[in-house]
Image (cartoon, rainbow, N blue to C red):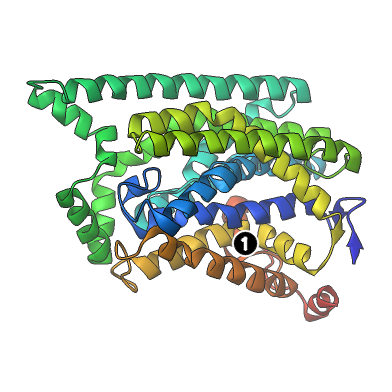
Amino acid sequence: MATLSSTVQSDRIVTLDIIRGVAVMGIFSVNVVAFAMIESAYLNPAAYGGNHGPSLWLWATNMIVIDGKMRTLFSMLFGASMLLVIEKAEAAGRSGWWTHFRRMIALLGFGLFHYYFIWFGDILTLYAVGGLIAYLFRRRSVRTLVIVGSVLLVANMLLMGGFVYSQYVADVAAHAPGASAKAIKKWNEGLGDFYPNAARIAKDKALRLGSYAAFVTHNLARWMSVLQSILPFLADTVGLMLFGMAGYKSGFLTGEWSDARYRRIVAPALAFGALGGIGVVTYDILSHFYVVGMFAAFLILDTPFVTVMAVGYAAAIILASRKVGPLAQRVAAAGRCAFSNYLGTSIVATLVFCGWGLGFYGSLQRWQAWLLAPVLWSIMLLWSKPWLERFYYGAFEWAWRSLSRGKLQPFRRPKRIGAAAAA
C-alpha cells in the first residue's frame, strides 16, 4: 500500500486525482435526474418524477450531501489543475499563456459539441470561458486569490438575487386579478416554467423520445441558448477556480498540510454545510416547493454553506486517502480519466433515457432513474485503472491533449511499462 506523504506519484499529484474522482462520480448523482425527465424536475421535485416516499428522500439526501458540493469541488480542482499545467509548460520552456489558451479553446469545442449534440447541462463551455478569465490571476498570492474569489461569489449571489426578485415581481403580477396576457407570458417564460403543465411535459417528452436528428436540429436552432448556461454562473465558477488555485498554492489540495490541520477543518465544515442543506430542504418542503423561494434558497443563501462543505469534503478525502489502497487507486484513476468519465456518463445516460436509445425518458420516478448512478460509478471504477495501465490517458483526455498541442500525442504505453504499472 503506497503512502501519500509526498502526494506525488509518477508526476501526478494523487490527491488532486482522488478528489476529482470523487467529484465526477458525485456530480452524476444529481445530473441523472436531468437526463431522465423534464429539466424543471432537477430543482423542483414536485414538477415531475415524484416528491414523496423514496423519491423525496433521495432528493433531500442529494440536496444536503451532494448537490452543489461536487460541482464546487470540480470547479476548484479545475483551477488547481489549470495552474499546474501552466507551471509545467513554463518550466519546460513553453509559453504558459499559449498552452493554456489552446487547451481552453479545444475544451470550448468539446463543450459546444456536448451541449448541442448530447446534453443541455454541459459545464465544459463554462469552464473554458471561466478558465480564460482565471488565467489573469495565476500569479496572485493565496490571500488575493481567496479575496477575489469571495468577491466573485458574492457578486454572483447579488446577481442571482436581482434575478430572483424580478421573478417574484413577475409571479405577483401574473397572478394578480385581471393580470394581462403579457404579465402571464413573462412569468411562464421565466421561473413559471418550473411548474410545467401537461402540454409542456408532452412537448418535452416528444423531443427527447423522438429522433436524434430532430433533437440536434432543435438544439442548433436555439444556438444562442448556450449563453444561458454560461453567463449566469460565470462569476461563481471563476471564483471557485480561484479558490482552487489558492488551494494548490497553499498546499491544501495537494495534501501537504498536516493531518491535524485537515482534521480541524473536516467536522466544522461538514456540519456547517449540512446545516445549510437541511435549511434548504426544510424550506422547500414547508413552502410546498415554491420555485422562487427554492431558487433563492439554493442559488443564493446556500452558496457559503455549499462552498465551505466542499472544502470540508476535500479535507476529508485527503485524510481518508493518505494510504493509497486498492479503492483509492481506482478513485484516483477515475479522476485521471474525469474528462472521459464526464462525457461518457452523458453518452450512456442519453442512450438509456432518450428515444434513440432505450427510451426510458419521462417514464421513471426519481429514485428509479437514480439507480443508473451506482451502475455508472461502478463502471468508472472498473475501467479507468486497467485502461491507464495500457494507455497514457483516457480517450477524451488524449483527444483534448492532441488538439491542444496540434499533433497526435503518445497514447498506448509500451507493454513493458504497462506490465510494470499493473504490478
- Residue occupied by mark 1: 398
Q: Is residue 118 visible?
A: no
* Residue under the image location 73 percent in, 55 percent down: 18
Q: Label 1: few (<14), some or many (≥20) within 10 Å?
A: many
Residue closest to the eye, 306 or 203: 306
Q: Is residue 78 above or below residue 409?
A: above
Q: Is residue 185 visible?
A: yes
* Residue under the image location 62 percent in, 55 percent down: 401
x, y percent for residue 47: 30, 47
For the N terminus, the image quarter is bottom right
SS at badge 1? helix
Which quadrant of the figure has residue 87? top right
Q: Left or right of 334: which side holds 91?
A: right
x, y percent for residue 41: 35, 48
For the C terminus, the image quarter is bottom right
x, y percent for residue 39: 34, 48
Q: Is residue 99 above or below residue 368?
A: above
Residue closest to the eye, 152 or 259: 259
Q: Left or right of 177: which side holds 21?
A: right
Residue closest to the eye, 297 or 117: 297
x, y percent for residue 215: 26, 58
Residue closest to the eye, 280 or 381: 280
